[in-house]
């Protein structure tokens, strides 16, 4: 039956892949145009495609201005009918492809939903006849039938090996070629690793869920080791990315498990699904990385505050925060991993225009003084900064791009508040930008690290002030 308008709101029946793709693109185009008009004409704000995943300010509701709350509330209200249609069409497409309905939940996952949309747009209907060797997909299937081993161990090894090789190439493209540490690298790649490795593993015979998850995790683990072995990344960056990568790989492996499941009457359909799925992933992920690179996302300015109470007056504390002597070696495990930590602070001059140098284990921050309100407020900018860490690696002195220009400190300040009992509340604040995506994950790491740096400095100022 042909596509009807009523198919947009009725979840009964099925939707073919061509109808699903065309309708999805048209609806998304209409939605983006509508949102852009509301943003620019009504609220006077800029709006682009990546604003659906990246916001330009803090996302905590209690920190958001009322005007922005009205704007996002309007977008949510406009999105409701589009969400309904998207869910309905996805349910119909899943039914048409013979996949379980619960996969509709992927519709709500940022970035992964793009890959999933492309995947559903190419998977054939359940009733599609088996591809013949004369077609492109038929020839690919014929080659895979002869190449992929029948045994569980052999197919798992081949699936992991191929995905590790492909992921290494895609990582080189993203990191070295495009300079991206973003959604494609940290979300799309581990998801695709888990998905493709399981699809190859289950190509010849249906595999169990547990074994599929194990293969997906092995693919990510070995891909991580490969990046360390070829000196693309260091150990600490891989460890920090591991929790996110493992979760996404498991999720990709679960979807791969569903696709490779088969019964005797649809044995060939699952193989056809595998060929289509791997094909679209290999093309879509680099393309999305390129789009992300050209979007040139601007990270929001974040703020980290840390406070200590000092048993001394502001006049006693002030000279010990403007410049402080050598700190003792760090005892925290965090700073033993190679992450930069403060050693001492020096200053040239006095008052506005003086230049402060906060020396870290990897070099010095250059901090021209902007506000000198003794003994209440010292505020400074940041015109230069050292690498954020010394990466742990089997090789000496590796320099991944993320060591520079991806975590920018923009400005900072010390605020002293005189308490009624003669003590001082000292508050240290850093404003910075984090160019790693997704921000919801990576900002937790950067906030924690900066907070621990603050604690190291403030506790030293507290100790020296109270000793005096």
Image (spheres, grey):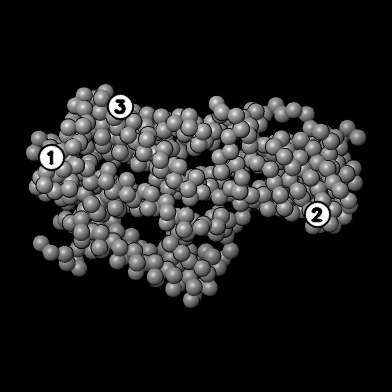
Q: Is residue 429 above or below residue 220?
A: below
Are dots 1 and 2 in contact, CB under 8 Å? no
Identity of the residue drawn at 84% across and 36% down: 325
How many residues crowd mark 1 within 10 Å: few (<14), some (14–19), many (20+)? some
What residue is disc 1 on?
Answer: 268
Quarter in which the N terminus is drawn: bottom left
Residue 139 visible somewhere in the drawing: yes
Q: Position of residue 353 (x, y in %)?
A: 84, 57
What residue is disc 2 on?
Answer: 369
How many residues crowd mark 3 within 10 Å: few (<14), some (14–19), many (20+)? some
* Frontmost residue, 450 versus 305: 450
Look at the numbered disc 1 and give the secondary structure of its residue: helix
Q: Position of residue 437 (x, y in %)?
A: 50, 48
**Which is closer to the viewer, label 1 or label 3?**
3
Identity of the residue drawn at 68% across and 43% down: 386
What residue is disc 3 on?
Answer: 157
Q: Is 5 on the left or on the right of 252, as rendered?
A: left
Quarter in which the C terminus is drawn: top right
């Amino acid at each position: 039956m042909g596509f009807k308008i009523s198919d947009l709101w009725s979840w009964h029946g099925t939707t073919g892949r061509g109808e699903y793709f065309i309708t999805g693109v048209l609806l998304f185009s209409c939605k983006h145009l509508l949102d852009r008009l509301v943003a620019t004409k009504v609220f006077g704000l800029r709006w682009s495609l990546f604003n659906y995943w990246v916001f330009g300010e803090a996302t905590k509701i209690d920190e958001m201005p009322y005007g922005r709350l009205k704007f996002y509330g309007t977008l949510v209200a406009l999105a409701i009918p589009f969400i309904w249609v998207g869910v309905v069409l996805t349910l119909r497409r899943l039914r048409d492809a013979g996949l379980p309905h619960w996969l509709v939940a992927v519709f709500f996952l940022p970035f992964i939903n793009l890959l999933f949309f492309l995947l559903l747009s190419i998977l054939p209907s359940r009733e599609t006849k088996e591809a013949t060797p004369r077609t492109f997909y038929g020839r690919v299937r014929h080659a895979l039938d002869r190449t992929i081993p029948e045994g569980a161990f052999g197919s798992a090894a081949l699936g992991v090996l191929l995905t590790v090789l492909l992921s290494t190439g895609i990582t080189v493209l993203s990191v070295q070629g495009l300079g991206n540490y973003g959604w494609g690298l940290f979300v799309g790649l581990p998801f695709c690793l888990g998905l493709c490795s399981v699809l190859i593993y289950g190509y010849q015979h249906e595999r169990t869920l547990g074994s599929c998850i194990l293969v997906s995790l092995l693919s990510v683990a070995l891909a991580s080791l490969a990046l360390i072995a070829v000196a693309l990344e260091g150990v600490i960056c891989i460890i920090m990315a591991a929790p996110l990568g493992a979760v996404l790989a498991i999720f990709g492996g679960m979807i791969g498990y569903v696709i490779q499941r088969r019964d005797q009457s649809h044995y060939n359909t699952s193989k056809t699904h595998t060929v289509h799925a791997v094909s679209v992933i290999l093309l879509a992920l680099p393309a999305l990385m390129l789009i992300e690179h050209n979007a040139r996302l601007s990270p929001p300015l974040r703020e980290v505050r840390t406070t200590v109470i000092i048993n001394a007056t502001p006049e006693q504390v002030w000279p010990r925060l403007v410049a402080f002597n050598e700190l003792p070696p760090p005892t925290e495990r965090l700073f033993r991993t190679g992450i930069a930590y403060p050693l001492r602070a020096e200053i040239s001059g006095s008052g506005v225009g003086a230049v402060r140098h906060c020396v870290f284990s990897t070099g010095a921050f250059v901090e021209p003084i902007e506000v000198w309100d003794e003994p209440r407020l010292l505020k400074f900018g940041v015109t230069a900064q050292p690498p954020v860490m010394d990466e742990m690696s089997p090789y000496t002195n590796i320099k991944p791009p993320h060591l520079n220009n991806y975590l920018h400190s923009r400005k900072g300040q010390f605020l002293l508040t005189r308490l009624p009992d003669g003590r001082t509340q000292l508050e240290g604040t850093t404003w910075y930008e984090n160019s790693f995506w997704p921000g919801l994950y990576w900002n937790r790491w950067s906030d924690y690290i900066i907070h621990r740096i603050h604690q190291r400095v403030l506790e030293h100022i507290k100790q020296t002030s109270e000793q005096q």
